[in-house]
Amino acid sequence: MINGAHVIVYSKDAEGLDAWFKDVLELPSVDVGDGWLIFALPPAEVAAHPTEEANHHELFLMCDDVHATVERLTEKGVEFSAPITDRGWGLLTSIRIPGGGEIGLYEPRHASPRWVGAAQKGSP
């Protein structure tokens, strides 16, 4: 029924953010017209969390080794707004993105439906 997700990250510097996705994160993209880029993302997962605050949504990029990823991204000029912290469910930090704002980066320590799906299909 659902075959993917389309994530929108709003920025006051959308062109800078496009360049960042392309040059820093090295995400493949397609130009859908007039220079409007849409970037591919790795497999994703979604979770519902309870809140007493106003509804909001967050974006976290996931990696296998957060320390190595932070080191590589730092070499590319990426700024981090928080130190790596151990949250139990994973190691977490925050990346400053062009135009303001942040996205999370974490190394999960919890089970992932990505792994379950791969195991069910006979992949490692």
Image: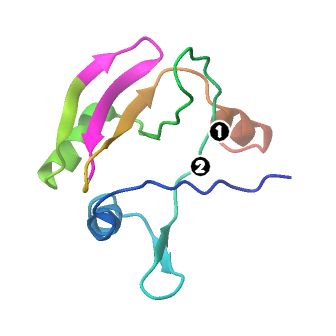
Segment colored magenta:
84-97
> How many other residues sit within 10 Å of disc 2, few (<14), some (14-19) or many (≥20)?
few
> Three-letter amino acid code at disc 2?
Pro
Q: Residue furthest front?
A: 54
What residue is at 64 percent from the left and 40 percent from the top? 124
What residue is at 25 percent from the left and 24 percent from the top? 84
Q: Is residue 5 left or right of residue 71?
A: right
Q: Quadrant of residue 83?
A: top left
User: Could you tell me which secondary element the residue under label 2 belongs to?
Assistant: loop
Task: Name the residue beneath numbered marker 1.
Answer: 114
Q: Quadrant of residue 76?
A: bottom left
Residue 21 point in image, percent of width and height: 35, 62
Q: Earlier in the sequence, mark 2 or mark 1?
A: 2
Q: Residue furthest bottom?
A: 34
Task: Name the residue beneath numbered marker 2.
Answer: 43
Q: As displayed, is residue 53 above or below residue 68?
A: above
Q: As displayed, is residue 32 above or below residue 47?
A: below
Protein image colouring: rainbow
Residue 82 point in image, percent of width and height: 22, 28
> Three-letter amino acid code at disc 1?
Arg
Tell me whether circle 2 and circle 1 mark residues in contact (CB < 8 Å).
yes
Please state which of residues 19 and 28 is positioned toward the viewer in this rendering: 19
Q: Main secondary structure of the magenta part?
A: strand
Q: As displayed, is residue 65 above or below residue 6?
A: above
> How many other residues sit within 10 Å of disc 1, few (<14), some (14-19) or many (≥20)?
few
Q: Is residue 37 left or right of residue 72?
A: right
User: Could you tell me which secondary element the residue under label 1 belongs to?
Assistant: helix
Please state which of residues 72 and 17 is positioned toward the viewer in this rendering: 17
Q: Is residue 75 left or right of residue 92?
A: left
**Disc 2 to disc 1, C-alpha distance:** 7 Å
Marker disc for residue 104: none
